[in-house]
Image (tube, rainbow, N blue to C red):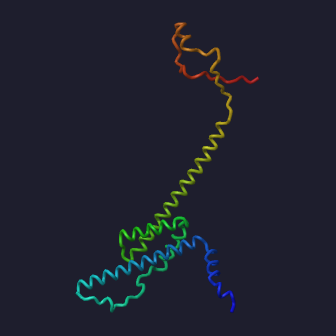
Amino acid sequence: MALTSWFRWNESNLRLSQRNPSDMVVDTLMMELSWQMKQAEKQHREKENEYRKIKTGVDYSWLVSYPKHNFDISPGERLQLEDSCSKIHPSYCGPVILRFRQLIAEYEPDVQEVPRLFRSVLQEANEKLREEEDAKKLARQWNTKRAMSLSLTTFKSRARIYPFASDIKTISEDVEREIEPTRRVWSMPEFRTTKED
């Protein structure tokens, strides 16, 4: 007896770990969609049975055999949904599923409405992702502009401030000389350029 037959589980784990994360997101989200569609179909059947039971007064549900899955989305719509799922970042997979389940519980849609609801959740997540990317891009641009402006502030200009220069006029000198003060802000020091030799 070969030992490789005993370790077949090891091969499946190896194959799963080599899969692309975006493929796993697509598979997970599409499984969630099909499960929610099955649940919606099951709830629809239960409501029909309750209605028949109330209408006829007799319960024949034990006689009826339903097919496992009646409603299925078209291949084109499935491809569009898979394409939308592939744009979802793996970190958003859980929040997308939670939001989808929340909307299903809130609206209790028919089977045909479930894919449309799923599409709206995917669009919402893609828009949120795009907004975050735009915000990151703006933050990067702002940081580079700020770094450039900081590098310009280190540039030494030729204008120097001499707060203790002897020829600075003060208000007290003008009062003593009885001269009208010039229209100058007295709290600002005088600026001069240095003379280059």
Query: Could you tell me residue 173's position as x and y percent?
Result: 56, 10
Residue at the image point whose x is 42% and y is 72% from the top? 116
Quadrant in the picture for the C terminus:
top right
Question: Looking at the image, which is closer to me, 90 or 132?
Answer: 90
Quadrant location of residue 109?
bottom left
Query: Could you tell me residue 86's position as x and y percent?
Result: 54, 70
Picture layout, residue 97 above or below residue 38:
above
Quadrant in the picture for the N terminus:
bottom right
Q: How many marks?
A: 0
Question: Looking at the image, which is closer to me, 132 or 92?
Answer: 92
Residue at the image point whose x is 62% and y is 23% from the top? 191
Query: Could you tell me residue 15's position as x and y percent?
Result: 63, 78
Residue at the image point whose x is 54% and y is 55% from the top? 134
Query: Could you tell me residue 21's position as x and y percent?
Result: 59, 70
Picture layout, residue 184 above or below residue 50:
above
Residue at the image point whose x is 42% and y is 86% from the top? 68
**Extreme right residue here?**
197
Picture layout, residue 82 above or below residue 127:
below
